[in-house]
Amino acid sequence: MTEHLLGAPDTWLDEHGAALYKYALLHSRDEHKAEEAVQETLVAALQARERYAGEASARTWLVGILKHKLMDMFRYEARMTTLDDRGEIEEGIGLDDGLFDAHGHWKDKPSDWGNPEEMLERGEFMTILQHCLETLPNRLSRLFMLREVMEEETENICKELAITPTNLWTMLHRARLGLRRCLDRNWVGQAA
């Protein structure tokens, strides 16, 4: 019955490989890591196929496994890098760089970004967001992806990376500032 719902394992790569690879590449930003994550996903799915309950489509089930594999990869990489990346993190993205007034309000309001939903539907926003994520220091980009895209819980991120919530929120703030600047330059600036 499981094979009826999931399809034959030897067809998974043909049927779902491109979508899995695209998802992995978007999140890992590295072709080799994306390929490795897809391979690990398919192996894990093969081993777990008897536990597939049929509550989701085969692709959704595989993407769920892939998401866990990517999280494992991020956790491993976080353990392998030094925890004090201050030089890299602070390079060009400071907390107090004159963007806010004494009351914490923007000095210069963000640019008009038009209709983000429409741009997202056309795929433009994701391409530019990916570019902007690549301009951030790796640690900031990964933390942003974990928290905002993969929706990992704050306490899990802090526990895995051995950082405080304050440190996490500071780095996320810096990532958002960097993304705002990049989007203003590369997306809004192009539209204007």
Image: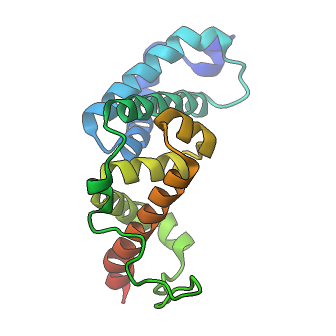
The total of numbered circles placed on residues is: 0
Picture coordinates of residue 174 (x, y %)? 42, 64
Query: Is 129 above or below relative to 57?
Result: below
Give left or right: position of 100 versus 188.
Answer: right
Tell me, yes or no, if residue 124 can be seen here: yes
Q: Nearer the viewer, residue 191 or 6?
A: 191
Q: Residue at x 38, y 21 (%)?
A: 39
Give left or right: position of 190 versus 113.
Answer: left
The image quarter containing residue 59 is top right
The image quarter containing residue 178 is bottom left
Name the colouring of the figure.
rainbow
Q: Residue at x 64, y 8 (%)?
A: 50
Picture coordinates of residue 78 (x, y %)? 39, 35
Q: Residue at x 57, y 82 (%)?
A: 104
Q: Nearer the viewer, residue 168 or 67?
A: 168
State which quarter of the image contains the C terminus: bottom left
Picture coordinates of residue 3 (x, y %)? 61, 13
Q: Nearer the viewer, residue 7 or 23?
A: 23
Give left or right: position of 59 versus 135.
Answer: right
Q: Nearer the viewer, residue 8 or 62?
A: 62
State which quarter of the image contains the N terminus: top right
Query: Is 9 above or below relative to 87?
Result: above
Q: Residue at x 41, y 47 (%)?
A: 142
Tell me, yes or no, if residue 8 can be seen here: no
Query: Is 1 above or below relative to 105?
Result: above
